[in-house]
Image (cartoon, rainbow, N blue to C red):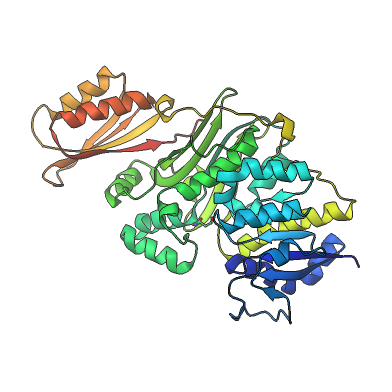
Amino acid sequence: MKQINIGIVGMGTVGTGIAKIMVQNKDIISARIGAELVLKKAADLDIERDRGIDFGPDLLTTDPFLVTDDPDIAIVAEMVGGTGIAKEVIERAIENGKHVVTANKALLAEHGNALFEKAENKGVALAYEASVGGCMPIIKTIRETLVSNRIEAVTGILNGTCNYILTRITNEGITFAEALKDAQSKGFAEADPTLDVGGFDTAHKLAIISALAYGMKINLDEIYIEGISNITPMDIEFAKDCGYRIKLLAIGKFDGNAVEARIHPTMVPFSNQLANVSGSMNAVSLTADGVGNMVLSGRGAGMMPTATAVLSDVADIARNILAGGGIRVPLRSYQAANIREVPIRPIDDIKTHYYFRFTVFDRPGVLSKIAGILGNHGISIKSVHQTERKLDGGVPLFMLTHRANEADVQSSLKEISALEVSTQNPVLIRIEEDES
Ligand code: HSE
């Protein structure tokens, strides 16, 4: 049987997972691909640690370039992460004519345009299923299943840490800090958890999938990003009473001219499948002509789910090699010549429904002043609720609005804050109503 040699750079959690699956499921992998995948070399700074696998002599090295430069290796898996040495590893492997598989969403979001061009010019694969949603096949679905459809919206829960934190607060009322600590101990938080809770990891993933879905260059800089650290149990509780769950959503919508690309905590109605995705699970809802709405869900992080996605890319490349080489499916879904700059709509221009929580003095005229300002800006109130519960010297006043324009909302909140009827800054959460 033909052998296809693989090299791995970065033998941390995911790198080790790839090696484990290659050993444990060697028989079915060969039976399905028609060739044997062989781990030829693996690099890591630490080659002494027991990873529970017998690598034999000379397989492990501390020099990543012994992997990228090995003439017998056809496919290099970059599992280092980050935007430092990982970039050099990928560039060198491509220059050496090797196919590359990566899970590195930060690197692709920041340098993907140049890296993809480099791989396309060299005629090698740069595959990245594991960069978004772990084992959930979002890249394959956009690139292959929906090849004949116009995609209109990609909306997803793409960060397991945030979803885990919001779920624990929702279900058990534990604090944000306790939930984050727990997510870190379970191993799905990033080394720097501000990437998770600040929404940046989700933005990296949205930058990648919106580019793929809409045939545009990756544009991380224009994505609106708001994380979950200001979400309080009170907002979660009120949302629940009104029939919503709060999720950190990545929203990428295309109207044929411009893309809306935004990450923020979002109130999602119970009837939306994304509202029921809990714990560290990821999910993406795709809307396209011809198919309407489809939802994918799965484990977005962790050793085996991520390694599974890497091996799915490795298998695609191995099958191309066995079929005589060439890149059958364009790396970025569209032929390189058809990839264009598509403007991202500024957040001020979006229109959606809103939730506000004001903390106000409980005295005559306050509500009418707030409602007056909203009315002057054309914002129509859908419902109002005030409780007697004391909060920071005031009482909470909750409001839901009909569809409104973000710029009008921001101007209104500024004017309301200047009224000096509040004891805290207003809280705003955008609502994603079911369009149906
Ligand atoms: N920190 C990420 C998460 C890992 O929590 O989803 C996968 O990208």
Horizontal and vertical percent position of residue 345: 48, 27
Left or right: 89 in relation to 247: right
Figure quadrant of residue 346: top left
Q: Nearer the viewer, residue 218 or 264?
A: 218
Q: Nearer the viewer, residue 161 or 101?
A: 101
Figure quadrant of residue 415: top left
Please say whether residue 91 is visible from this viewpoint: yes
Residue at 61% x, 53% y is 87
Horizontal and vertical percent position of residue 332: 69, 40
Q: Residue furthest left?
A: 363
Residue at 38% x, 36% y is 430
Left or right: 230 in relation to 200: left
Horizontal and vertical percent position of residue 131: 60, 52
Q: Quadrant of the N terminus?
A: bottom right
Figure quadrant of residue 19: bottom right
Horizontal and vertical percent position of residue 243: 38, 42
414 is higher (above) or lower (below) than 159: above
